[in-house]
Amino acid sequence: MPEEFKQKRINHIFHYTGQFEWLKKILKNGFAPSYCEERINNSMYYIPMVSFCNIPIKDVDNYMHYGKYGIGMSMEWAIKHELSPVIYIHENSPIKNLYDTSFNLTMEQFIKKSLFDSYNKHKKISNKEYPLTEEQILSLYSISQKTVQFLKNWKTDYNGNVIITYQEREWRFIPKLRKVEELEIIKEDDEEFKDYKNKRIKKPHLPDYILKIDKITDIRYITIKNENQRPEIIKILEKKFGETNLKKSIISGKLVILTEHQLHNDF
């Protein structure tokens, strides 16, 4: 009989936020995606997302530079809502230049198709078609764009310190944008990027693509700064999910509300 394979599983993902008001807003309404600045290889991008870390509870306070407040959601919730882990890359990764490569290949295919179609039209050849349709070319480009949205450098500079981001085990929610003016990726040489970076235009949130918290059992952990904030969190949860459901979650240990002091000293 084969030996049982044992593996420690972290069945939650953590999202950090910087203010108590933002934490309350998330609990009431859900997670609103926004354009986040991301360095991929040596290029900068804005990508619409909500990011989470798949880290053990004992390490949660190590990442509070992202925000003093946090919500730990169940892994079942994450998979149900199509969150996925990022792909970590380094300077020698074969897909490090995927954005530029896919863009160049797409343009090349469009040019080839245009020349092919023009030649056939000029020669009055009607029984030959280019191997790819415009829709197929755009589809290939779209797939590569979606992959780029999940790329992340394995280490980065944060306030002068080198951080190994690979240890964060990041998961992302990338909204499926429906409006023409909503860009899947904004590159650093785009005018929109410069406007956001220089704060000429405020980076938009995307309230039409809220990542909802469906039920109380979706929430595993909530981290707050001090005990004075606990009653307000309890009140929000009672109003949204009902007093009975909240009590069941807390008594069963499925939902734990922790202060910054408890995180730092008890784990």
Image (tube, grey):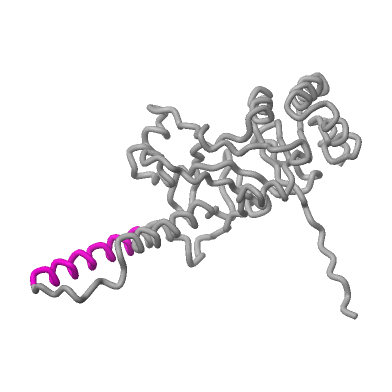
Q: Position of residue 124 (x, y in %)?
A: 10, 72
Residues shaded magenta: 103-122
Q: Position of residue 83 (x, y in %)?
A: 61, 50
121 part of magenta stretch:
yes
Foreground residue among 33 and 117: 117
Q: Tell me the residue at 22%/63% (across/down).
A: 111
Q: Position of residue 135 (x, y in %)?
A: 34, 60
Which secondary structure dominates the residues rendered in magenta?
helix
Q: Tell me the residue at 77%/52% (across/down).
A: 10
Left or right for 241, reference 108: right
Q: Tell me the residue at 78%/40% (across/down).
A: 217
Foreground residue among 167 and 185: 185
Can you say whether 202 is above or below 52 in the image?
A: above
Q: Position of residue 92 (x, y in %)?
A: 50, 65
Q: Quadrant of the C terminus?
A: top right
Foreground residue among 165 and 36: 36
Q: Tell me the residue at 43%/42% (across/down).
A: 178
Can you say whether 265 is above or below 231 in the image?
A: below
Left or right for 183, reference 65: left
242 part of magenta stretch:
no
* Residue 108, quarter of the rendered image: bottom left
